[in-house]
Amino acid sequence: MKLGYPCINRGIGCAANRKFRLSSYSEEKLINTVANNLDCMQRILKYNLRNNLLFFRISSDTVPFASHPICDFDWADYFSSKLLEIGRFIITNGMRISMHPDQFILLNSPDMDVTQRSISELEYHCKLLDSMGLGRSAKIQIHAGGVYKDRKRAVGRFVERYESLDETLRKRLVVENDDRLYSLRDCLLINELCGVPVIFDSFHHECLNNAEDFFSAVGSASATWCKGDGIPMIDYSCQQEGARKGKHATSIDVALFRDFLEEVRDFDLDIMLEIRDKEKSALKAIGIMNELGLV
């Protein structure tokens, strides 16, 4: 198993997700911001490697406004050497990468303008991973979208739009069960209809489920991944005490995480730890995995 955390290292002293306002856009500002983000990404990846945190989610803000019409700068060509250098580091050291654009990605929106903006954003994510030379196991995870008062038609639109995407992008996409609208069962139906792999979010499953037992749920999601997709990925978090239902915990509950590992130890999974203090909890988690002989 590989374990990691998303986007930000809070203790390393740099940010790999710097951005700026659209009103202040310029080519110079874009170049400087992307250069900073890539330099910081390298520092984070080196930190992660030293600490055996071999799974990392790259920030969608690596290239600000990359999918916006204002950006006509060929950032992939300008930063091609740097991107390939980062990609070689990832591949050489057996690391796993993913991305997770914001929830404004709505492939199944009835509004085609919203859908087209979503597709443009996904194409940017795919281009970034392609520019690093990463294979299709570097995934882009999305939610199924809205229900729009008619779940059956909403699912149909998702399938139709997914199947219309460029094959390179389709092979990177995975769909995640969420905590309000699309349960694991809904995502498994989408998989049956179009073949998109399902990434299982254990915390979302606690919030929204159809009474599946946990072991079966993990198994069902894992079975949707083909060999070329890489090892199935799973998102892990737990409830923040005293907060609204579905809010991720600030710090890992060591006892709960140990119980989780015991439940999934028979599966081959890469675990994304969605805990708000990022690498602090990841270091505790990797220690527990070492104790249990899972890494």
Image (cartoon, rainbow, N blue to C red):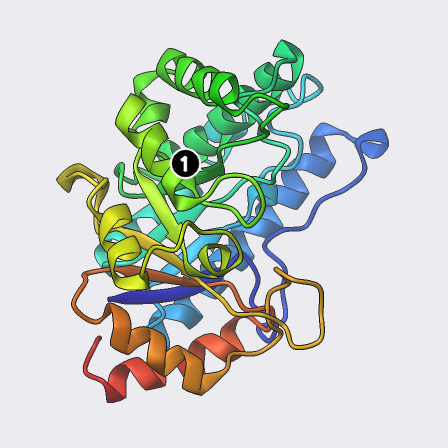
Could you tell me residue 38's position as x and y percent? 52, 50
- Residue at 50%, 73% (x, y): give it: 279
Could you tell me residue 207's position as x and y percent? 53, 57
Q: Choose top left, top right, bottom left or bottom right for residue 93.
A: bottom left
Label 1 crowd bin: few (<14), some (14–19), many (20+), radius 10 Å: some
Could you tell me residue 114's position as x and y percent? 65, 18
Is disc 1 placed on a helix, strand or loop? helix
| Furthest residue in direction front, as rendered | 211
Q: Is there any visible trace of residue 256 in the rendered image? A: yes
- Residue at 60%, 65% (x, y): give it: 248
Instruction: Report whether 286 appears left or right of 18.
Output: left
Instruction: Report whether 201 appears left or right of 66.
Output: left
Instruction: Report whether 215 appears left or right of 142.
Output: left
Q: Which residue is mark 1?
A: 186
- Residue at 32%, 53% (x, y): give it: 233
Query: Where the N terminus falls, by quadrant?
Result: bottom left
Q: Is residue 229 above or below residue 127?
A: below
